[in-house]
Image (spheres, coloured by chain):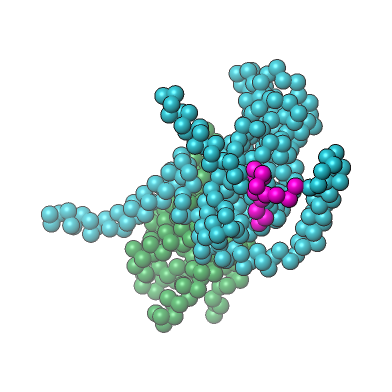
Chain colours: A cyan, B green
């Protein structure tokens, strides 16, 4: 007993170091393999409020640019609206909508790490839940991962853990959108069949087999394509429409039917087992 | 005097975290270079203080930076490692001198200070990026990041430390 106590006393610094290192390694490894840590993220009260304060100061410097972007988007939506073929009056009834849209602002953005997260200034009291899709006026941005009362963190598509279903516009050729961490304006689309005819400049949009994003949300254009190592499928470099370094206004998409879809899928899986 | 040094360290702790997360984490020089200036806390921390407290403080420092940058506990692991290794590094840089009672960082030569700071930074970044990238297949990428970001961190830390240095008589 005496010896054990002596041992602990002698190596207390080393043991303390080992203890702290183990905690941090455990947290890190856990977040690598599974979901991002639920508690230790920037959507908590302290960090969220500090980011909110600073972003409320810094946004003033980009207001002109931001306005231009929003007017541009309004123009596009107006054009769509006025050129609609249907004669009947606009449907303002919200009972039939599948996607609810929540507008929000980015208060912290990172794009230089292998696993990037964006913090936004809306949380559970605004109806934001994990696994909602996030887009900007130009295209896809990411998926909500953690929420707190007033803030939420979004797993950016610039994250090695992100996998979004995507397809080539006007075709039914699907693949997964991943990121190789090299360039924050370029992402990769993998698992596109070898037989698919591709052209540089083709548009890539989100696919239909996801309950998070609606179909046909723009992502980017093909910059380069190669066959992968096994020569069986294409791997594409996609240049994003979004400028990931300067996202400000965003929209969070709430799929009203998502719970129903998940429930149904779970039931089907259970039945088939 | 003792209270004064506590006070200075608390101020440093808070300011370095804020400067790190609000300014330097948004730099993204060349798309990925974000200098980690909060290492200066470990460079400036008094030598004669208790080591356990120092380890705990370093862990907390790293962990706060982690909270802000959504990196779970990468900064904490790297920072606690250099905090543990600091006495060894100091012995390497300053020789047996540093064990004397009246040893002060300002009394050493410029070259010794830079070596000390550089070693802290390089070890920190090596641990950080190894854990961040988490695969030995990317050794080249890790080395590239360590080299480029260490250089940036070192330059900025030297600038900051000369800006806020205690005046020499």
The residue located at (72%, 29%) in the rendering is A168
Residue A121 in view: yes
Q: Between A168 and A187, which is closer to the camera in this rendering?
A: A168
The number of numbered badges drawn on the structure is 0
In the image, is residue A238 above or below residue B120?
Answer: above
The spot of residue A244 in percent (x, y) is: 69, 48
Question: In the image, B43: left or right of A159?
Answer: left
Outermost left residue: A1
Which quarter of the rendering shows the N terminus of chain A?
bottom left
Foreground of the two, A191 or A214: A214
Up-down relation of residue A74 to residue A64 (above or below): above
Q: Position of residue B13 (x, y in %)?
A: 49, 68
Q: Identify which residue, B83 or A50, lies in the foreground.
A: A50
Q: In the current view of this chain or complex, which residue is farthest to the bottom?
A: B1
Q: Which residues are magenta?
A: A91-104
Q: Nearer the viewer, residue A24 or B122?
A: A24
Q: Does residue A81 show up magenta in the picture?
A: no
Where does the image place residue B102, in percent across and percent down from the top left?
39, 74
Q: Residue at x 17, y 53 (%)?
A: A4
Is A98 one of the magenta-colored residues?
A: yes
For the point 52% across and 60% down, the residue is: A149
Q: Quadrant of the C terminus of chain A?
A: top left
Task: Look at 53% across and 62% down and name the residue there.
Answer: A47
The image shows residue A100, relative to residue A181, as above or below, that is: below
Where residue B75 appears, x then y in whole percent? 48, 54
Q: Taking A220 as reference, is A19 left or right?
A: left
């Amino acid at each position: 007993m005496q010896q054990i106590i002596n041992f602990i006393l002698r190596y207390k610094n080393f043991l303390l170091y080992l203890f702290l290192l183990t905690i941090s390694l455990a947290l890190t490894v856990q977040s690598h393999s599974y979901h991002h840590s639920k508690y230790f993220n920037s959507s908590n009260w302290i960090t969220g409020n500090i980011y909110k304060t600073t972003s409320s100061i810094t946004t003033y410097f980009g207001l002109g640019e931001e306005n231009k972007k929003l007017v541009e988007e309004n123009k596009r939506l107006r054009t769509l609206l006025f050129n609609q073929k249907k004669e009947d009056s606009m449907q303002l009834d919200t009972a039939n909508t599948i996607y609810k849209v929540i507008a929000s602002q980015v208060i912290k953005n990172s794009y230089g790490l292998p696993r990037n997260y964006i913090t936004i200034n809306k949380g559970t009291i605004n109806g934001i839940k994990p696994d909602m899709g996030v887009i900007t006026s130009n295209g896809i941005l990411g998926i909500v991962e953690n929420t707190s009362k007033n803030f939420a963190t979004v797993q950016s598509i610039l994250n090695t853990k992100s996998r979004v279903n995507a397809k080539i516009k006007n075709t039914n050729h699907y693949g997964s959108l991943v990121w190789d961490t090299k360039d924050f304006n370029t992402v990769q689309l993998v698992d596109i069949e070898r037989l698919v005819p591709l052209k540089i400049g083709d548009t890539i949009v989100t696919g239909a087999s996801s309950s998070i994003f609606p179909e046909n949300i723009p992502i980017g254009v093909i910059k380069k394509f190669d066959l992968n190592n096994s020569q069986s499928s294409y791997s594409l470099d996609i240049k994003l429409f979004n400028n990931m370094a300067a996202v400000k206004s965003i929209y969070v998409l709430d799929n009203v039917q998502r719970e129903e879809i998940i429930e149904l899928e779970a039931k089907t899986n259970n039945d088939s087992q | 005097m003792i209270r004064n040094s506590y006070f200075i360290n608390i101020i440093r702790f808070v300011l370095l975290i804020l400067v790190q997360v609000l300014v330097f984490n948004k730099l993204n020089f060349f798309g990925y270079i974000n200098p980690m200036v909060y290492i200066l806390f470990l460079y400036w921390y008094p030598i004669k203080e208790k080591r356990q407290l120092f380890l705990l403080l370093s862990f907390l420092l790293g962990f706060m930076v982690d909270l802000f940058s959504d990196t779970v506990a990468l900064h904490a692991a790297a920072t606690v490692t250099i905090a543990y290794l600091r006495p060894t590094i100091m012995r390497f840089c300053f020789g047996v001198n540093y064990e004397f009672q009246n040893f002060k960082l300002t009394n050493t030569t410029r070259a010794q200070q830079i070596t000390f700071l550089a070693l802290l930074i390089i070890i920190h970044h090596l641990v950080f990026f190894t854990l961040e990238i988490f695969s030995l297949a990317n050794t080249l990428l890790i080395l590239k990041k360590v080299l480029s970001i260490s250089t940036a961190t070192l330059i900025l830390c030297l600038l900051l430390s000369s800006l806020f240095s205690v005046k020499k008589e």
